[in-house]
Image: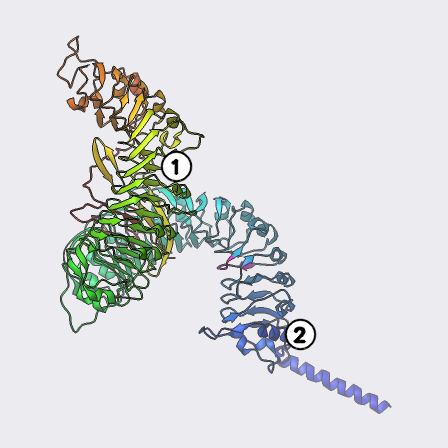
């Protein structure tokens, strides 16, 4: 017994001795515990619940998980605690996983998890399972770009230890809970990344209490209201991204030198005010993007201190006129985007010449002058050179051909001149985007039979003095945009054009040439992806060509097309803009036009269509402009027009419409322009049956009809849009289309500028664009009787007023003197009596006045604008006297200028001169295609693009670039 006990004690002694030796040798510390069986089994179960998508090229981490390998701590994407063996981190991001996860998933048995990353997979629009609350030790949760959808569960808030929360790039909704709940419950957050999540709320100021935050990313979340300035000043914040939230307002506060901010992106939000000089204190800032905000004032000179910047985008703001003097010390810049920020002057070497790391230089839509510097060739890393819409002059320097990395060269709409050899372009082997349009260049393309050309995606050669279709186009099979507008190409379009980039071509612009038709009319057109076809202002003959079903915008205005509109056009289900104006088309309108549910602009003016206007305006009508003027339509107006609840412009002038005045159109809430002149409109305008009639009307022309009764004073009282206007809002009426995704440009906003004709100063004037503030009333050529109501003086925004050729009686009301914006006043051919009110001299913008052929008496007021009017303004009033008439007043003196107290009431000088221009008859459509808006002018003789319509320019007036 004793010997046995001694043996046991001896063996225990040896065991302890061996342990001590292991510890002393360090071997004991290298022994780690194995994965727990229950966690290994749970992981394998989780693997079995998902599918590995074999069609992707990404390596799937879970493919290494095998039951034969019992230690799950060695599996890909798994990390275990070195002391306990529990799984604490699971990262199976980008593993080609497909399937769904529910709350009973074995994943939630891994209760020791601290980090979970399921990003870049496809969980098939399943909801985030509420079982996530069981992972109470989570500090990092990343479900970004993983195909989850629906509401974000409130159980997320139970993960109180979260340091990083990333749910971005999923179709998720964060409504209940909202941002406030996250800020209140997850107080340890350092990273909050919810980009593309539908939040649709304000940003709570309590978020500024989370002092540990280093990263906030709330891109395109539907945020609105004012952004709390305290968030900018969080002590540890390094990255703040709230761009693409257009209803989010706010101002940028002052910064101190201790701010660690590295990334600030506000682009596409509605921040305003000035950028503070203290931004120069952000010594760590390397990305700044405030594109398309509303910042004003000067660009701070302190920006010169931001020497760590690699990305700078200040484009599309309303900064004060300035130069590039603050640029030059940011030698680490790779992207410099300064489009449309009121830059002027030359492009100085001191500002740009030393930025040798630049890959993108975008200076479009400014006022830059001088030549394109030859030293740009020193910037050998450049892949994008975008100078469109400036005033650069001289030739294109040949040194550009040494920029061998160049992919994008955009010089649209400058004053460049001279001859350029296309062989110079061919040296740029990587070039896929070339735009030379709207300059004074002559492009010389030599025939090349045995040479190869680079494959273009964008090729814009408008206004390049081309006389033929370039032969090298035959081999272009990747074009997405082709612009050959405003050249001298004549005759038929060659048959080989039909084989051009059949699968890729989206934009085809051949306007402003002398094309007569297709050598072999493709029917239908072969381009499967074609969305924009512009053939206007040519000499096309024959039947109206029908574009492919993919078409979004089709303009063939100002040609010589004949025949009727084929029923095939009704198969174009995506069509939004249809412009066939100024042709010789005839016949009845197809009833099936009502099937075009997406149509927003219908322009058929100046053709020979006849018959009644069919009831084609169905419920859900999306039309913003209907122009049917100068045809032979007859019968009554279609009552289905009331379905077009977003209609802004209705022009059915110069037809044979027989109907009573359509007061029922007054229920259209957005109607701004109503033109029914020269028809058979009759009856009384009468009184509105309710206050809200024509609430936004600002232009009405019902001249040359048979309307009788008194002037509609009750309408004058309720036409609110004519009573005031915003002089700072110098934009144009337009139909806003949808955002279109394009490979080369990002998102493009498609728009169409509204147009009209209106009698101004006695001349029929074509308005190729309608200024937002233009207000006009033309009731001339009817049978209105009675007095001019004094209430007319309420319409203070009026620019044009025409009551001529009626049977109005009584005095000219002195209240017209209140219309201080009036530029054209025509009261001729009536039976008005009494003196001309002397107060009218105060109408200092009055450029046209006609009071002839009335029964006016007494002296003509003298001074100011009245000194510019000729005899014809007052002829036919035998009792009028004084200059400019030869008849002198009885006291042989011209009457004095009215007292100055009236002048004092007129306020300061009108802030701008309203430009009246008589435009040659013709028509043009104004396409405006994303990051820049402007006008397109068309004349019938000289071609329609004085500013060539080139779709897809980031800095052109018709293009907005969103390269995100």
Asked if residue 193 lies left or right of residue 909, the reply is: right
Residue beneath label 1, please? Answer: 665
Quarter placement of the N terminus: bottom right
Quarter placement of the C terminus: bottom left
Image coordinates for residue 344, horizontal then vertical, percent: 25, 45
Question: Which quadrant of the view contains residue 827?
Answer: top left
In the rendered image, the vertical position of residue 277 relative to residue 334, given as above or below: above
Asked if residue 548 lies left or right of residue 261, the reply is: left
In the rendered image, the vertical position of residue 228 relative to residue 239, given as above or below: above
User: Which color scheme does this rendered protein use?
Assistant: rainbow
Q: Secondary structure at mark 2?
A: helix
Residue beneath label 2, please? Answer: 38
Image coordinates for residue 419, horizontal then vertical, percent: 13, 58
Q: Which residues are magenta?
A: 164-171
Foreground residue among 259 and 456: 456
Foreground residue among 78 and 948: 948
Foreground residue among 354 and 171: 171
Q: Residue furthest top?
A: 891
Image coordinates for residue 648, horizontal then vertical, percent: 36, 41
Q: Residue furthest right?
A: 1
């Amino acid at each position: 017994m004793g010997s046995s006990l001694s043996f046991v004690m001896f063996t225990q002694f040896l065991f302890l001795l061996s342990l001590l030796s292991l510890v002393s040798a360090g071997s004991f510390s290298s022994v780690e515990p194995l994965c727990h069986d229950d966690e290994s089994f749970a992981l394998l179960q989780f693997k079995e619940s998902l599918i590995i998508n074999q069609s992707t090229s990404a390596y799937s981490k879970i493919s290494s998980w095998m039951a034969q390998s019992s230690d799950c701590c060695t599996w890909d994407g798994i990390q275990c605690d070195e002391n306990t063996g529990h799984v604490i981190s699971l990262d199976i991001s980008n593993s080609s996983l497909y399937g769904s996860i529910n709350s009973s998933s074995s994943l939630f048995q891994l209760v020791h998890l601290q980090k979970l990353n399921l990003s870049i997979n496809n969980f098939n629009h399943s909801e985030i399972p509420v079982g996530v609350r069981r992972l109470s030790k989570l500090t990092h949760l990343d479900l970004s770009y993983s195909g989850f959808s629906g509401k974000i569960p409130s159980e997320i808030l139970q993960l109180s230890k979260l340091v990083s929360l990333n749910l971005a790039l999923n179709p998720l909704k964060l409504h209940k809970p909202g941002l406030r709940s996250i800020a209140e419950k997850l107080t340890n957050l350092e990273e909050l990344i919810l980009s593309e999540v539908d939040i649709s709320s304000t940003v709570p100021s309590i978020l500024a209490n989370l002092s540990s935050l280093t990263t906030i990313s709330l891109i395109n979340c539907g945020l609105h209201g004012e952004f709390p300035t305290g968030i900018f000043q969080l002590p540890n914040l390094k990255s703040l991204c709230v761009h693409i939230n257009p209803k989010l307002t706010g101002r940028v506060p002052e910064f101190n030198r201790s701010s660690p901010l590295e990334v600030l992106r506000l682009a596409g939000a509605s921040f305003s005010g000035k950028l503070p000089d203290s931004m120069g204190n952000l010594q760590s800032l390397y990305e700044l993007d405030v594109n398309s905000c509303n910042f004003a004032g000067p660009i701070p000179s302190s920006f010169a201190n931001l020497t760590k910047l690699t990305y700078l985008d200040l484009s599309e703001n309303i900064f004060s006129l300035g130069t590039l003097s603050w640029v030059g010390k940011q030698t680490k810049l790779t992207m410099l985007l300064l489009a449309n920020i009121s830059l002027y002057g030359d492009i100085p070497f001191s500002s740009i010449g030393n930025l040798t790391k630049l890959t993108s230089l975008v200076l479009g839509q400014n006022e830059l002058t001088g030549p394109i510097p030859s030293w740009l060739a020193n910037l050998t890393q450049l892949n994008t050179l975008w100078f469109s819409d400036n005033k650069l002059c001289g030739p294109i320097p040949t040194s550009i051909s040494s920029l061998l990395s160049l992919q994008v060269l955009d010089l649209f709409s400058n004053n460049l001149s001279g001859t350029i050899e296309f062989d110079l372009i061919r040296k740029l082997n990587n070039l896929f985007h070339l735009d030379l349009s709207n300059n004074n260049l002559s492009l010389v393309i030599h025939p090349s039979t045995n040479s190869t050309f680079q494959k273009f995606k964008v090729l814009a050669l408008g206004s390049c003095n081309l006389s033929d279709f370039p032969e090298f186009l035959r081999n272009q099979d990747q074009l997405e945009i082709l612009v050959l507008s405003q050249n001298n190409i004549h005759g038929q379009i060659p048959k080989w054009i039909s084989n051009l980039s059949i699968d890729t071509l989206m934009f085809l612009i051949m306007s402003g040439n002398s094309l007569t038709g297709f050598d072999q009319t493709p029917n239908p057109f072969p381009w499967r992806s074609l969305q924009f076809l512009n053939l206007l202002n040519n000499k096309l003959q024959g039947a109206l060509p029908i574009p492919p079903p993919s078409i979004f915008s089709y303009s063939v205005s100002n040609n010589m097309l004949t025949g009727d509109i084929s029923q095939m056009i009704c198969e174009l289900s995506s069509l939004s803009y249809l412009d066939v104006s100024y042709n010789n088309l005839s016949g009845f309108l197809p009833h099936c036009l009502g099937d075009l549910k997406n149509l927003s602009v219908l322009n058929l003016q100046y053709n020979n269509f006849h018959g009644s206007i069919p009831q084609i305006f169905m419920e859900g009508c999306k039309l913003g402009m209907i122009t049917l003027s100068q045809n032979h339509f007859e019968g009554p107006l279609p009552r289905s027009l009331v379905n077009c609840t977003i209609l802004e412009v209705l022009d059915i002038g110069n037809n044979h419409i027989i109907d009573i005045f359509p007061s029922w159109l007054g229920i259209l809430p957005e109607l701004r322009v109503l033109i029914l002149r020269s028809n058979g409109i009759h009856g009384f305008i009468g009184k509105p049956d309710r206050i809200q009639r024509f609430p936004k009307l600002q232009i009405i022309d019902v001249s040359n009809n048979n309307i009788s009764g008194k002037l509609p004073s009750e309408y004058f009282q309720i036409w609110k849009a004519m009573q005031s206007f915003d002089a700072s809002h110098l934009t144009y009426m337009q139909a806003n289309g949808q955002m279109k995704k394009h490979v080369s440009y990002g998102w493009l906003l498609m728009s169409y500028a509204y147009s009209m004709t209106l009698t101004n100063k006695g001349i029929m004037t074509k308005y190729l664009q309608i200024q937002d503030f233009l207000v006009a009333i033309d009731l001339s050529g009817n049978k209105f009787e009675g007095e001019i109501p004094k209430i007319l003086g309420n319409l203070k925004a009026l620019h044009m007023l025409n009551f001529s050729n009626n049977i109005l009686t009584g005095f000219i009301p002195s209240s017209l003197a209140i219309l201080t914006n009036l530029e054209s006043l025509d009261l001729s051919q009536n039976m008005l009596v009494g003196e001309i009110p002397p107060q009218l001299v105060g109408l200092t913008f009055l450029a046209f006045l006609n009071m002839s052929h009335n029964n006016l008496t007494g002296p003509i007021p003298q001074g100011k604008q009245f000194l510019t009017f000729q005899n014809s303004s007052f002829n036919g009033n035998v009792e009028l006297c004084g200059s400019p008439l030869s008849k002198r007043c009885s006291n042989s003196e011209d009457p004095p200028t009215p007292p100055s107290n009236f002048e004092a009431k007129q306020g300061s000088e009108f802030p701008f001169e309203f430009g009246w221009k008589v435009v040659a008859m013709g028509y043009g459509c104004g396409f405006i295609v994303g990051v820049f808006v402007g006008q397109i002018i068309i004349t019938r003789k000289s071609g329609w693009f004085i500013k060539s319509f080139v779709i897809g320019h980031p800095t052109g007036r018709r293009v907005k670039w969103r390269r995100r």
